[in-house]
Image (tube, helix red, strand yellow):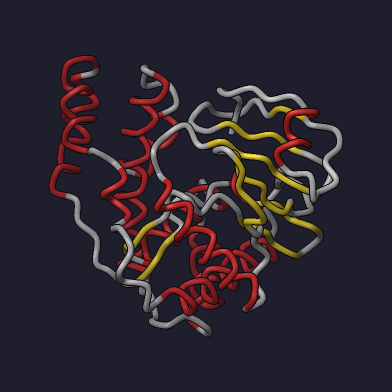
Amino acid sequence: MGVVTTITLTEAQKLFPNFSLRKLIPTSDGVMDTTYLLDNYVLKHYERDIEKKIVEDSKLLHHLNRNGLNTPLHLASSQGWHLYSRLRGSRLTTTHYFHIQAVARFLAKFHTLTAKHHLQTPFLDGYELTEILKQTKETHYFYYKKLQELQNFHQQKDGFIHGDIFKDNTLFDGEKLGVFDFIDGGVGAFSFDIAVALMAFNPHQKSSLLQLFLNTYNQRAPRKIKIKELQKEIKNAAKLYALLRIQKYKNPKKAKELANLW
């Protein structure tokens, strides 16, 4: 989230006259796409050519919402701006056992609903890994040597995955989990989706929390995930996001936060 393309409240109200828009608040986290918060809505402007993905994303969100998952809805589009419903809740500062179970239940149901979504773009196609590795080789050779095996990274196609369930894409309203920003998801491995979430919600990889997650997830999921498969994917996910952080921030500082998971 963040703001690249600016808009005033009056301009937004003209674009979406059928909605009551008040208190347009710019966000400050991230710079990929423009995001404003309103009382009951989220206003977005995508700073890249992803019109097809926006249509697919809208259908997916309605499918998930209809089936009981706490996800936003795409409400309307106008002149490149997109209005979504706003989830209630706050970001976690401290993770408890019930939060781990809530994430596990969400992902189990999400994966059950998306297990047959194989016609969409593969998740890894959204990242030009070969080019990013080339740039990293020129600027941060030490990390290139650590991460170069990503050029051979492939995922099995279990179904549609979010792929980015870090804490800044989730909200908790009590024990109720809400997840947003599915736009960069794609077809991939369910174990990778889990790995990313556990990097965020169990950063020290406590074995008790890993097992609690899997016990909860496997009761409801379309296929059971084994601990060895998950541990392998945690390493893959940590390397991928370390590389993406180096590309985004132009230095390895934030990549180091994931180094203990490689």
Residue 9: % across, % down: 79, 29
Q: Where is residue 158 in the image (x, y as percent from the top left)?
A: 32, 72
Name the one closer to the observer, 260 or 250: 250
Query: Closer to the camera, 64 or 261?
Result: 64
- Horizontal side of 9 relative to 261 (left or right) equals right
| Quadrant (top left, top right, bottom left, bottom right) of the N terminus | top right
Residue lying at 40% horizontally and 44% vertically, measured from the top left: 50
Q: Residue at x 85, y 46 (%)?
A: 20
Up/down of 57 relative to 33, above or below: below
Indicate the position of residue 124 as horizontal and vertical percent values: 28, 50
Viewer can see residue 205: no
Q: Residue at 39% x, 66% y: name it.
A: 160
**What is the quadrant of the C terminus in the image?**
top left
In the image, residue 199 above or below residue 14: below
Q: In the image, residue 28 lies at what x, y percent?
A: 65, 25
The outermost residue toward the top is 139
- Comparing 69 with 105, the one in front is 69
In terms of depth relative to the viewer, which is nearer, 128 or 104?
Answer: 128
Residue 246 appearing in the image:
yes
Which residue shows up at 36% across the image and 71% down it? 159
Quarter of the rendering containing residue 80: top right
